Image (cartoon, grey):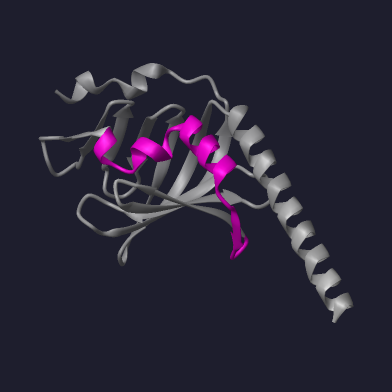
């Protein structure tokens, strides 16, 4: 019985240490990252869309959807979604969306430092909550970069976004986040 207790204790501490080391590496990786270019696959309920984005910490993103022609842009304060079928873009305060926290590097780093990271299905996952919306953030197990997220959109739909990073810390034209062109 004593040997079993010692074995369980050692296994627990090794697991906690390994998780702590991975978390520290993800934090270091985030600290050294200013932006990502990535392709994405987004599933909203049963619908699937693809496209590409440029994410600049903190809180800026520009996405173009492949088939629908939809555009999603945030300047850090507001989020604009424009469908090709509509001449009128939809403006939202960024702070009223889960992007407010997803695109905030300091928030992600703070949460990583204070929460347990889980290893599920080959992804490292941290569970967050913002304005009573659960957000699962995924990190790649191999390169420790952001891998995607799962949340609920403003229409209460389940949204799973998987990303494939193509470039890190690229020089970015900040005019990509200018919302004046949508007025």
Which region is colored magenta? 95-122
How many numbered discs? 0
In depth, the one of 151 and 176 nearer the eye is 151
Q: Is residue 12 left or right of residue 106?
A: right
- Residue in the image at 29% along x and 20% along y: 178
Magenta stretch holds residue 101: yes
Task: Give the vertical position of 111 relative to 4 (above or below).
Answer: above
- Residue in the image at 62% along x and 61% along y: 122
- Residue in the image at 59% along x and 53% along y: 117
Task: Give the vertical position of 119 relative to 142 (above or below).
Answer: below
Extreme front residue here?
Answer: 2
Residue 10 locus on image (x, y percent): 83, 63
- Residue 122 visible? The answer is yes
In depth, the one of 72 and 149 nearer the eye is 149
Magenta stretch holds residue 99: yes
Which quadrant of the figure contains the C terminus? top left
Which quadrant of the figure contains the N terminus? bottom right
Residue 144 locus on image (x, y percent): 64, 44
Q: Is residue 116 left or right of residue 58?
A: right
Q: Is residue 95 left or right of residue 9?
A: left
Residue 17 locus on image (x, y percent): 75, 51
- Could you say which quadrant of the image residue 86 lies in? top left
Task: Give the vertical position of 101 relative to 160 (above or below).
Answer: above
Extreme bottom residue here?
Answer: 1
- Residue 162 visible? The answer is no
Residue 131 locus on image (x, y percent): 29, 46
Q: Is residue 106 left or right of residue 94?
A: right
- Residue in the image at 47% along x and 44% along y: 39
């Amino acid at each position: 019985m004593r040997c079993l207790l010692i074995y369980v204790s050692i296994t627990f501490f090794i697991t906690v240490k390994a998780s702590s080391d991975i978390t520290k590496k993800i934090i270091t990786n985030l600290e050294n990252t200013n932006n990502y270019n990535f392709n994405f696959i987004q599933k909203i309920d049963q619908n699937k869309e693809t496209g590409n984005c440029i994410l600049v910490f903190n809180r800026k993103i520009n996405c173009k959807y492949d088939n629908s022609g939809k555009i999603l842009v945030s300047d850090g304060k507001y989020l604009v979604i424009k469908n090709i079928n509509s001449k009128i873009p939809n403006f939202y305060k960024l702070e009223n969306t889960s992007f407010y926290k997803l695109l905030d590097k300091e928030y992600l780093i703070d949460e990583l430092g204070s929460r347990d990271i889980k290893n599920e299905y080959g992804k490292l996952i941290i569970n967050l909550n913002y304005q009573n919306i659960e957000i699962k953030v995924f990190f790649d197990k191999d390169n420790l970069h952001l891998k995607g997220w799962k949340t609920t959109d403003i229409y209460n739909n389940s949204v799973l976004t998987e990303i494939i990073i193509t470039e890190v810390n690229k020089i970015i034209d900040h005019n990509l986040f200018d919302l004046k062109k949508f007025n």
